[in-house]
Image: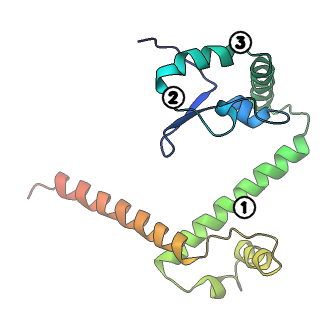
């Protein structure tokens, strides 16, 4: 069995497929294969397909672009610094929203009350109201998922303390 480190190859556990990260991210035009579109899981022929991908011109161009972009991001010298800063600000915004929603899930029904006093939640509710965003993390399914995750974490902490206890 051949073992070869390929930084560009990512595996989706849920789909049980591999993808070419740089080609999926940076390809121009239509997909040139399953590795940059729907994923690949023909494990018997994987070695051959991966070797073909590695030497393809489009893959090599995408790898070079990806490597260059990765290097520029490391030193914060991107061509589109403003777009990156906006992206970073948006990521921070969503992190803040999720932190608050997790707190709300602990005490259901507080979103409307807190948005009156909290600027982040006020902006979030406003974005929902004017249909600027459709994914808002306030639905029943995400709240149930957050409750489940919090319950699992709490159970894990309790079990850890029980195992550490002398009696």
Of circles 2 and 3, the one toward us is: 2
Question: Which residue shows up at 54% across the image and 69% down it?
Answer: 142
Residue underneath mark 1:
93
Among numbered discs 3 and 1, the one appearing first in the sequence: 3
Of circles 3 and 1, the one toward us is: 3
CB of mark 2 within 8 Å of CB of mark 3?
Answer: no
For residue 63, side relative to residue 52 (left or right)? right
For residue 63, side relative to residue 4 (left or right)? right
Question: Which residue shows up at 75% across the image and 21% down it?
Answer: 59
How would you rate the neighbour count of disc 2 (Cα within 10 Å): few for under 14, some for 14-19, many for 20 or more?
few
The dot on residue 55 is 3
Quadrant into which the N terminus falls: top left
How would you rate the neighbour count of disc 3 (Cα within 10 Å): few for under 14, some for 14-19, many for 20 or more?
few
For residue 154, above or below residue 11 = below
x and y percentages locating residue 20 in the rendered image: 65, 29
Along the line of sight, the residue nearer the viewer: 13 or 89: 13
The dot on residue 42 is 2
Among numbered discs 2 and 3, the one appearing first in the sequence: 2
**In 3D space, how far apart are the residues under numbered discs 3 and 1 (Cα atoms)?**
40 Å
**In 3D space, how far apart are the residues under numbered discs 2 and 3 (Cα atoms)?**
19 Å
x and y percentages locating residue 80 in the rendered image: 90, 39
């Amino acid at each position: 069995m051949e073992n070869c480190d390929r930084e560009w190859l990512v595996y989706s556990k849920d789909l049980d497929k591999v993808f070419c990260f740089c080609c999926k991210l940076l390809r121009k035009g239509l997909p040139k294969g399953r590795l940059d579109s729907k994923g690949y899981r023909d494990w018997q022929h994987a070695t051959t397909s991966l070797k073909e991908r590695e030497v393809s011109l489009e893959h090599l161009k995408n790898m070079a672009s990806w490597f260059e972009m990765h290097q520029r991001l490391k030193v914060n010298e991107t061509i589109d610094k403003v777009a990156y800063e906006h992206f970073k600000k948006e990521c921070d915004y969503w992190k803040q929203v999720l932190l608050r929603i997790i707190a709300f899930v602990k005490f259901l029904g507080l979103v409307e009350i807190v948005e009156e006093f909290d600027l982040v939640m006020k902006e979030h509710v406003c974005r929902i109201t004017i249909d600027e965003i459709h994914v808002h993390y306030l639905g029943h399914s995400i709240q149930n998922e957050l409750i489940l995750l919090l319950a699992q974490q709490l159970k894990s902490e309790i079990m850890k303390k029980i195992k550490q206890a002398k009696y």
